[in-house]
Image (tube, grey):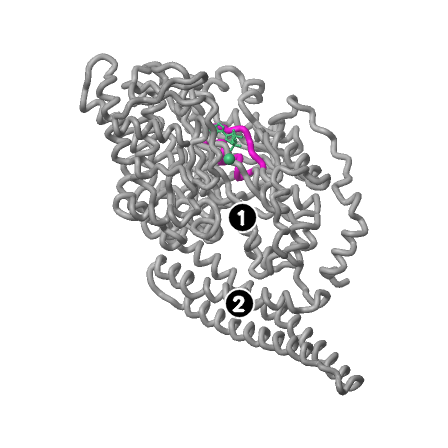
Amino acid sequence: MSAPSRKSIVQTMAAHSRARHDERQAKPIQLPQEFASHVFNDGVQRQRLTKPVYKALRRTIVNGVELDAEIADIVANAMKDWALEHGATHFTHWFQPMNGLTAEKHDSFLSPTSDGRAMMEFSGKELIKGEPDASSFPSGGIRATFEARGYTAWDPTSPAFLRKTARGATLCIPTAFCSWTGEALDQKTPLLRSMQALSQHAVRLLHLLGESNVTRVVTTLGCEQEYFLVDRRFYYLRPDLVATGRTLIGAKPSKGQELEDHYFGAISERVIAYMQDLEQELWRLGIPARTRHNEVAPGQYELAPVFEEASVAADHNMLTMEVMKSVAERHGFACLLHEKPFAGVNGSGKHNNWSMSDNLGNNLLEPGNTPGENLKFMVFLTAVIRAVDLHQDLLRACVAHAGNDHRLGANEAPPAIISIYVGSQLEDAIRGLVEGTAPAKKGADKMKLGVTTLPPLPRDQSDRNRTSPFAFTGNKFEFRAVGSSQAVAHPNTLLNTLVAESLDYLASEIEKRGGKGDRREVIDALVKEVLTKHQRILFNGDNYSDEWLAEAERRGLLNLRDTPSALARFAADKNLQLFEKYHVFTPRETQSRSNVAFHTYVHRVHVEAQAAKNIAATMVMPAGIAHQERLARSIQVAQQVMPRADLKPQLDCLELVSKTVNELKRSLDRLENARAHAEAHHGTPEEHAVAFRDQVMPAMAELRQHADLLEGLVEDDLWPLPKYSEMLFLS
Ligand code: ADP
Ligand code: MG
């Protein structure tokens, strides 16, 4: 049986436009009882472990005390019993290698006995340490083939969970992944290290501010996940979507179709069924999904959870992306997480909402009411401003990858220039402080900033500037340049590290300068000094405007437009030293991340070039030629039956099609040459990436231009690829 054509799918969809949403009678979830029912969390641990064992485990989770072997066996056994009761047969160490995905290798609990039966076993050793064959994961040069071993190590701070499918369940144990030399081969270990660094210096600073009862600071994270849904049948007819996650050719729908009416619009029944199924699965996994809505583009949606401790939130976001894809499959959708699945249509990002919170539950970026707390706010705000200005290069580099190049630095938010939006009132306040001008008069509901020269702010001032890559939104920062498909561990690792460095700086300066009593004068002066130096990073205007480009250049801010340029600075001396000082990456680990990122860029562009070539050669060209043939035949017939008719318009059509087909063929050859040339280019990883950017990317763009022109010429029933208008508007 041959696959259904594009046309037949559209016809079936029209015929069944009513009851196409998922009809299965899903058992509605019982909330809150079923929340986290698939998680071996604190509550389950307390219930299933004896008090001494539970306490020992808590010491490991909270204070990082090593778990002794005997206790580990007991914990493993309890975990296994719980998993078996939920239908599990296998366990896996679940980790985040440097390829930006998650990895798992399943082992069953089954252990044959000597009398031919079987037992279900799981030891403490198996819980704590795994040894997957690491040779196929990227190491960026850390691991030579003769030391191909990799180890996974249980991360007890992120609870184990069950992934259930129709035929059973697997116990997933979040782990770190490292080489036998102890170097991190994953994204999780550096994130945990960076959180430790930030905590250390935030606590130091808080103690200097008089908050001596704070013992620990965590970073909090909430990721707003954007995505597209397209009907899965269309998806299968698009080899580019399947291979690369984005359409490599495809003409934009006629202007006006991408209207504002989708954003926050009513959600269709089929999509709501998907979202509900998705949320229920996430809730059972203990992921606090909270907000759902339509996004700007047709077929685009968003899901946002309640924020959590950053390491857990990062795991949860990885899991969310996996669940989004698998639930979509059940509903006949394909979930597209690529940053730019459709050229000319709004792309997808992942707003990375980030803050810091002490062990007493106080958000350190909460402006608050009382002057004491407000001074604290001002100091932490200053630390972030300094960090972002000093390390723009790192914030830019951690969101640089092939997919995100279609958003950052292109004609879409946010731009490649890193700047901070703080809102006009806060910016005025900062300027007042820096320039020593008088504070504004008080109003009704104002928040006082606790620094004598700062005016109070209206409490509800909120961010409506959607063009900024890094915005202060009430009591957190929103890093908006992160791509929708990205693993968030890496960007947060960098954010934590560079803020840790600024906290360290402020604390050290206060210590050095001394001061009397509450050190108020010293701190005020330091805040003023640092803000004066780093205020150039603040920008409240339109980040898309040409004026900003010029202004940013005047201010000396970086504008790194594409992945190779952005990555080029990642392993600079300044950064090698920064990461080493805060024990986040060793120099070799930094270098390896740089290598992996360049390599991934090359690999992705390479795959795109191959896919574009195949589609153009085997689908687009033949459609063009078939249309050419049809036109030629109809002209021939017309000439016979109407010898004196004016056939110039038809001949012009034929000529245009022939010309486009020929140009397509030429650009196909050029693309193939460019790809082969770039591939053969030997040099540093950076030079290789630059070759792909400068040779292959433009050749793909040129090919696309001719293919898209042809789409507008070829008779509709000859066109094999689902069109934008169909993928975006029919579901
Ligand atoms: P908006 O919709 O204006 O972007 P929301 O208040 O809806 O902002 O929050 C968006 C995301 O920010 C949510 O995931 C939320 O949990 C997260 N968030 C809120 N407060 C914090 C915080 N203190 N730390 C980290 N993330 C936070
Ligand atoms: Mg947001």
Q: At 53% from the left edge and 34% from the top edge, which residue is drawn?
A: 316
Label 2 is placed on what type of residue? Answer: Leu
Q: Is residue 482 above or below residue 632?
A: above
Answer whether residue 560 is visible to the viewer in this image: yes
Residue 495 position, x and y percent, is 38, 36
Answer whether residue 110 is visible to the viewer in this image: no
Q: Around disc 1, counting alpha carbons within 10 Å, would you say few (fewer than 14), some (14 to 19), or many (20 or more)?
A: many
The residue that label 2 is drawn on is: 703
311 inside magenta stretch: yes
- The magenta region covers 303-319
Seen from the viewer's position, the closer of residues 31 and 462 is 462
The residue that label 1 is drawn on is: 347
Q: CA distance from mark 2 to mark 1?
A: 21 Å
Seen from the viewer's position, the closer of residues 212 and 682 is 212
Q: Which mark is residue 200?
A: none
**Tag 2, which secondary structure?**
helix
Residue 126 position, x and y percent, is 50, 35
Q: At 80% from the left edge and 49% from the top edge, which residue is drawn?
A: 16
Residue 522 position, x and y percent, is 22, 21
Residue 545 lies left or right of residue 626; in this view the side is left
